[in-house]
Amino acid sequence: MTSKKLLLVDGMALLFRSFFQTAPSGRFMYNENGIPTNAVQGLIRHLFAAADRIQPTHITVCWDMGKDTFRTDMFDSYKAHRPAPPAELTPQFDLAQQATRAFSLHNAGVRNYEADDCIGTISKWTKETETYILTGDRDLLQLLNGHNYVWLLQTGYGNWKTYDAALFREEYGIQPEQFHYVKALMGDAADGYPGVKGIGEKTALKLIREFGTTEGVLAGIDGMTPSLQKKLREGEEMLRMSERLAEIHCDVPLDWSWEQAAFTGTGEGAVSFIEEHGMKGLSRLARHTGYTEVDPFGFD
């Protein structure tokens, strides 16, 4: 391992999680211009709470760049059923990227790809470097290996379930790189692809443990129960499509370098941003030049 330590942040996952953590109570935290800021402030808090634990030398925040991607080109229903973002969240999308830039954090995103794909691509380039992925999305568990770690957001600030490859193997009984085969079989209701109708996570895991891949499952179909054979034969076309949708694409044409991602602390840009946008709850993070204890809990 090198002395570098990289934190890759799923910006949209943190933004949505931060919004919905406070939305039920109506704590949208409007600034003097009438713009809600709860999601942006929560994102910054989540991020620096993790940074204080990990102490990265480099940070990149990855973003979706529009709803249309190569996955929607492949499958019209991909994420199509998701409701429109709440009115209080919409103005915070651009504001969130402004905030991360103001806090001296590097942003990355490429049109036609998702943040997951950018994270996967960067993590592929960082061999021998400790790389921490902060997200709320289990799909990123497929990126676990000897130097990639995934921190899944839990309820509340400063709470994560931290995965390494060993813990994943212990919990799931497969290798991390096999996880997208499981997702292909079981589908993903949130992302709008069905997998094989009638196959859930338990059966999907059992099949991949036994056969290794979706191709292995299909090759071994004759030895299965008549019911399972019927499901797989009828769902084969969608299974193949779902596998392509579930797998993180790790060859994004991304402009990224260690120099861009280097993090040495925040400064005047953060102070100005906080003052301009009325986010006094972030004041303690405005001059975050080292990894001292920063209280990430609650809103001021």
Image (cartoon, grey):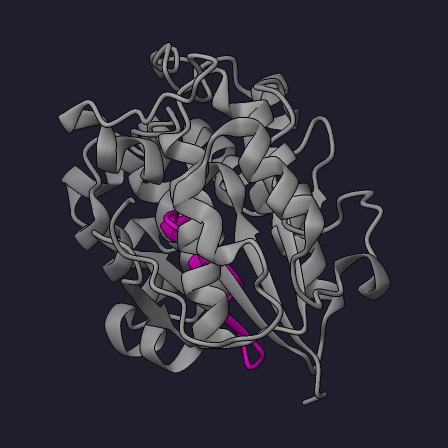
Pinpoint residue 169: horizontal percent, then vertical percent.
34, 76
Residue 230 seen by the camera: no
Residue drawn at the location 37% of the way across and 71% of the way down: 163
Residue drawn at the location 71% of the way across and 58% of the way down: 122
Pinpoint residue 152: horizontal percent, then vertical percent.
35, 58
Nearer to me, 285 or 114: 285
Magenta residue span: 134-149
Q: Is residue 22 left or right of residue 80?
A: left
Pinpoint residue 157: horizontal percent, then vertical percent.
28, 55
**Residue 76 higher or lower than 213, as above or below:** above
Which of the 4 image quadrants contains residue 230?
top left
**Residue 170 higher or lower than 37, as above or below:** below
Q: Quadrant of the N terminus?
A: bottom right
Q: Is residue 23 left or right of residue 260?
A: left
Pinpoint residue 150: horizontal percent, then vertical percent.
44, 65
Residue 77 colored in magenta in the image: no
Residue drawn at the location 63% of the way across and 24% of the way down: 69
Nearer to me, 170 or 235: 170
Nearer to me, 166 or 115: 115
Q: Is residue 170 left or right of residue 42?
A: left
Residue drawn at the location 39% of the way across and 47% of the way down: 137
